[in-house]
Amino acid sequence: MNDIELPFRATAYEACAWLTQQTESPWTLARLLENGLTPVIWLDYDAAYPELFGDANGGYAAPIFFRDDIARLAAGSEDVLITFTKDACKLPARLPAPGFRRSLDELRFPKKDLERLAGKLKHDARPAQQQAPAPGASEAQFGIGKAEVLAAFSGFVRLDLARELDGAVGIFGDDGARVKASARKSKRSTVWNPVTLALGLHDVYRVPLGPLKRAFKSHDFLYAWEIDWEESLRLLGK
């Protein structure tokens, strides 16, 4: 079976088909919601509700997260009823009674949320012995090895990344992303903090954030670092 391409915002059918392929288990709308995914509905601008749209005069994607609205969907409703959402400025907004109704085929699930869920499920499904650090390798809990760094980042940097890692200068050394003392025994035990390294590649070597962001979603060994990565970007305003 060919890999299914996810659009930026996937329908419930597309989301279920993609996750079924990724996890080799069946998915339904109810299961999407049970796993904490937040669907959105595109609301075209309506002059009757100016406070809801603000400057978004073309409309915006309104999230559906209110418990009662989600429970109704999960129970198998024939349409969507939104009674509470966020406005275009992301502030909580209660909609005029009885709420907005939309058809089920207008539901959309953001691609990034689906990818994050798939990564989490794959990580959780790995045997416990693969998730735990090997005995005597406590340093590895704080970084990733050379092979993993190359797998994640070498495809889009304009430098000999393997040589730079061995040189351990600047962002590749102990004053940068390399975990101090990890190379004390041998080069094999050297690990780097992938978040610090990715930020350094962006700041020092002008690597675009796009491929760096995709790297954290594309490799199982980076899943545990994704929250730190996104929080770092948020704090830096990127």
Image: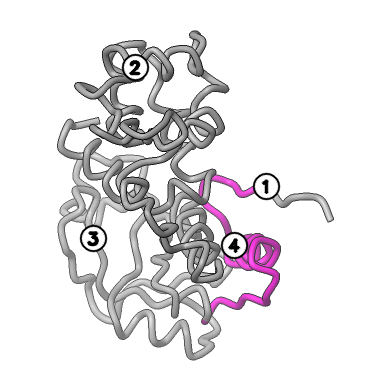
Residue identifier under label 4: 15
User: Which is in the foreground here, disc 3 or disc 4?
Assistant: 4
Nearer the observer, 213 or 56: 213
Query: How far is disc 1 from disc 3 in space, using C-alphas?
Result: 29 Å
Disc number for residue 86 = 3
How many angstroms separate mark 1 from mark 4 (CA)?
10 Å
**Marks 3 and 2 close (CB-CB < 8 Å):** no
Image quadrant where one finds the C terminus: top left
Residue at image coords 43%, 28%: 187
Secondary structure of the residue carrying numbered label 3? strand
> Where residue 18 is drawn, which disc sits there?
none
**Image: magenta residue range:** 5-30
In the picture of the structure, the residue carrying the numbered disc 2 is: 168
Answer with the quarter of the image where residue 151 lies.
top right
Mark closest to the chain's N terminus, 2 or 1: 1
| Image height of 232 relative to 25, above or below | above
Give the numbered dot on residue 5: 1
Q: Position of 231 compared to 8: left or right?
A: left
Q: Earlier in the sequence, mark 1 or mark 4?
A: 1
